[in-house]
Image: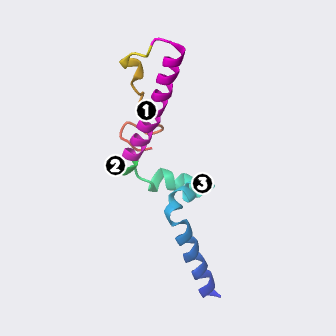
Amino acid sequence: MITIILISIIGIFLYIGPHLDQVLIRIPLIGYFYEKYLRTITYYRVDQQCMYQEAVHESVMQVLDELVKVQGIQPMSEFERRPVFRDLLQGQGSNGHR
């Protein structure tokens, strides 16, 4: 009986493995403490977030450029095309911790 339970738990962890972080965050009470005290900000996580935001920004700019060209509107200036990064680390204090 204990062997079956242990094998089941190991199987669940192997199945969830790559997504364990997201699973723990979604558990109501455990997720709060996990995210607040155990989940640290890493260079990898920040780099991944920056790359994602850059890709989305470039995609939006390409669509806007096409719309501007088709409708004959004046293109945006370089200043207007710059991304806004003030919400990059939303919800985090000045030292990078939540």
Picture residue at 52% right of the left edge, 54% below the top:
33
Question: Could you say whether the residue bearing mark 3 is in a helix, strand or loop?
Answer: helix
> Which of the labelled discs sits on residue 58, or is there none?
1
For label 2, the residue is 43
Q: Residue 24: x, y in percent? A: 55, 59
Question: Could you say whether the residue bearing mark 1 is in a helix, strand or loop?
Answer: helix
Please identify, in this view, whether the residue under mark 2 or under mark 3 is nearer the observer: 2
Query: Are the residues flagged by discs 2 and 3 in contact, CB closer than 8 Å?
Result: no
How far apart in space, not on screen, are marks 2 and 3 (Cα)? Answer: 23 Å
Q: Residues within 10 Å of mark 2 (few under 14, many from 20)?
A: few
Vertical position of residue 85 compared to residue 92: above or below: above
Is residue 25 found left or right of 62 in the rendered image?
A: right
Of the 4 image quadrants, the one containing the N terminus is bottom right
Please identify, in this view, whether the residue under mark 2 or under mark 1 is nearer the observer: 1
For label 3, the residue is 26
How far apart in space, not on screen, are marks 3 and 1 (Cα)? Answer: 31 Å
Q: Residue 87: x, y in percent? A: 45, 33
Of the 4 image quadrants, the one containing the C terminus is top left
**Label whose residue precedes the other's in the sequence (2 or 3):** 3
